[in-house]
Amino acid sequence: MPVTPSTGPRTSSPALFLVLGSCISLQFGAAFAAKLFPELGSWGTTVLRLGIAALVLLAITRPAVRRWNRDQWRATLALGLSLAGMNGFFYAAIERLPLGTAVAIEFLGPLTLAAVLTRKARDLTWVALALGGMTLLAVESVTTDAYLDPLGALYALIAAMFWALYIQTGARVGILVPGTGGLAVALVIATFAVAPLGMPGAVQVVHAPHLLLIGAGTALLASVIPYTLELAALRRVPRNVFGILLSLEPVAATFIGWLLLSQSAGPFRLLAIGLVVAASVGSSLSGRRVDDEEPVRNPAVAVTSS
């Protein structure tokens, strides 16, 4: 049986590496997606990316949807709509904002969720560290960027809300639906949800088939790999710890922005990176101590493999 986020063992160390892999893959995927914006637009890129990812995961998992009950379908539908909003508005944001800035704003979603769900002072320490890092990133962005597009910032804030919902619904699907079949169906739902806005742009690949290869790379790096890793992480740690671990996302965005987009990092950003890394590592080590101090009451319970 799957472990629930609230009652299962907190094995944060494996989750740290799962989330780190997800963050790096996702930001490489965002860099790929930026190459599609001039031809497909942000929403067209979103449709192409989600659609290809859905087809790939459906072919791999072949979910037994006929045996799903109402709760499983309801949770998967909620996850699909969360994925649609999170991806669509994030791509709309990075079309107008630097990658690191957009991710820093979007991270307010999981950070707020982590603060709301946290009940122990020790965990609040890691939330505070991550919040300090995000604040420094915001200061660095405002003081170095010539212009902060207000509509792009609004899109990032909307994406932040959907990111928090994604954590909630992803944890629910991880409990109710075994394997990654729920994720595959959720990606199908997300594709149809954004299709009205993005399909006119997505069909442009018919006239430029080479864009389909870029879209496939984007789908693999920005959807298939990271969401599979995150679903596995959500089965191993509580949602508030997962939200703190996601503080690695702006760090990865800063690194990829420097590596691929020639976006330099100033002293504020470097200090912010140190704070969010400390928050993630501290949360992971804290989870390990809880495992040592509070053994699982029912040893027959095991984490479902993804």
Image (spheres, rainbow, N blue to C red):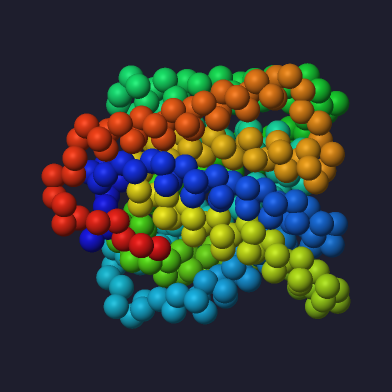
- Residue 178, percent across and down? 33, 66
The residue at 19%/40% (across/down) is 295
Question: Splitting the image into 4 quarters, where does residue 51 fall?
Answer: bottom right
- Residue 202, percent across and down? 74, 68
Q: Quadrant of the C terminus?
A: bottom left
Q: Nearer the viewer, residue 299 or 217?
A: 299
Q: Compared to 220, does 12 lie above or below?
A: above
Q: How many marks?
A: 0
Q: Compared to 264, does 85 lie above or below?
A: below
Left or right, residue 166 beside residue 257: left
The residue at 79%/73% (across/down) is 205
Q: Nearer the viewer, residue 84 or 9?
A: 9
Q: Is residue 113 visible?
A: no
Left or right, residue 55 beside residue 150: left
Question: Splitting the image into 4 quarters, where does residue 50 fall?
Answer: bottom right
- Residue 170, percent across and down? 41, 53
The residue at 85%/57% (across/down) is 38
Q: Is residue 266 visible?
A: yes
Q: Compared to 225, does 255 lie above or below?
A: above
- Residue 232, percent across and down? 42, 55
Q: Quadrant of the N terminus?
A: bottom left
Left or right, residue 38 beside residue 222: right
**In the displayed image of the protein, which residue is found farthest to the front?**
292
The residue at 26%/44% (across/down) is 9
